[in-house]
Image: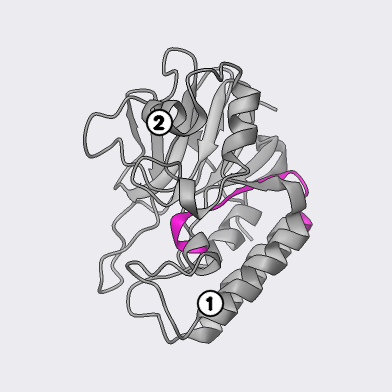
Amino acid sequence: MSRVLVIPDVHLKPWIFDNADKVGRQSYDTIVVLGDLVDDWEQGNNLELYKKTLDRAALFGLEHPNSLWCYGNHDVSYLWDQMESGYSIVARETVIDGITKLERTVGERYKFVHKIDDVLFSHAGLSERFVLHECGYHMKEIEDILSKVNRMGMRDLWRNSSPIWVRPQHSFIRMFRDDLFYQVVGHTPVEEPLEACGVLTLDLFSTYPDGTAYGNQKLYIVDTITRKYKEAKCKKV
């Protein structure tokens, strides 16, 4: 698996999955969804949109057994009952039901961090500090580290340095073994793909509060061997 179609932060835009379905399947080998399916500006009472988005995600996961899924901070905030920016009390039960349905649909494909070749995919990124502090200096093998991280819960992950929260785009943060691993993340809105310090940020569907697009609203395919990326071309229907 070397060509990965990346679906970044959805934030109640189910049509992103429709766009992904228009990408020719011969152009990629697998799909990674980077998390944050829910919450958006002024949509906290729009239960229909929450349900539509989560139902669409579950259907996409069913129709694409080659898709891998990452938890985002907005998604687990409901599972862990941690209020944050955008959290909707009104939508709480709808989100929990929807995420639970998605977990049943995709099973072991839903994790905090995925590794394909020497590329790590997560919502925000795996930092050196997080691995050393939360996994321990004794852990050397990447598979053991990821296994431990993917079993973690709120106590370990609800912190600024974790794979659902860290922001290396805002200040210098050493990412885990950046001499060996390349990372692909969402979480931090960018206008165009941002590649810096071994991290490719693809949160390109975010908007301003008035709904105006902030990012370029394009999907990208990442080659995990060459570490190059290109725009995913959507078929006309």
Q: Separation of disc 1 and disc 2 at Cα?
A: 31 Å
Instruction: Name the one closer to the observer, 135 or 105.
Output: 135
Disc number placed over residue 127 in the picture, else none: 2
Q: Residue at x 61, y 51 (%)?
A: 235
Q: Amino acid at mark 1?
A: Tyr
Vertical comparison of 223 with 219: above or below: above
Q: Earlier in the sequence, mark 1 or mark 2?
A: 1
Could you say which disc has been placed on residue 170 in the image? none
Amino acid type for the residue under numbered disc 2: Ser
Residue 110 seen in the figure: yes
The reply, left or right, for residue 28 in relation to residue 218 is right
Which quadrant holds the C terminus? Answer: bottom right
Judging from the image, the colouring scheme is one colour
Spot occupied by residue 224 in the image (x, y as percentages of width and height): 58, 24
**Disc number lying in front (1 or 2):** 2
The answer to whether 32 appears left or right of 40 in the picture is right
Residue linked to disc 1? 50
Residue 154 drawn at (x, y percent): 50, 54
* Residue in view at x 72 percent, y 37 percent: 26
Can residue 114 be seen in the rendering of this structure? no
Let me know if residue 178 is in the magenta part.
no
Q: Is residue 37 left or right of residue 39?
A: right
Q: Quadrant of the N terminus?
A: top right
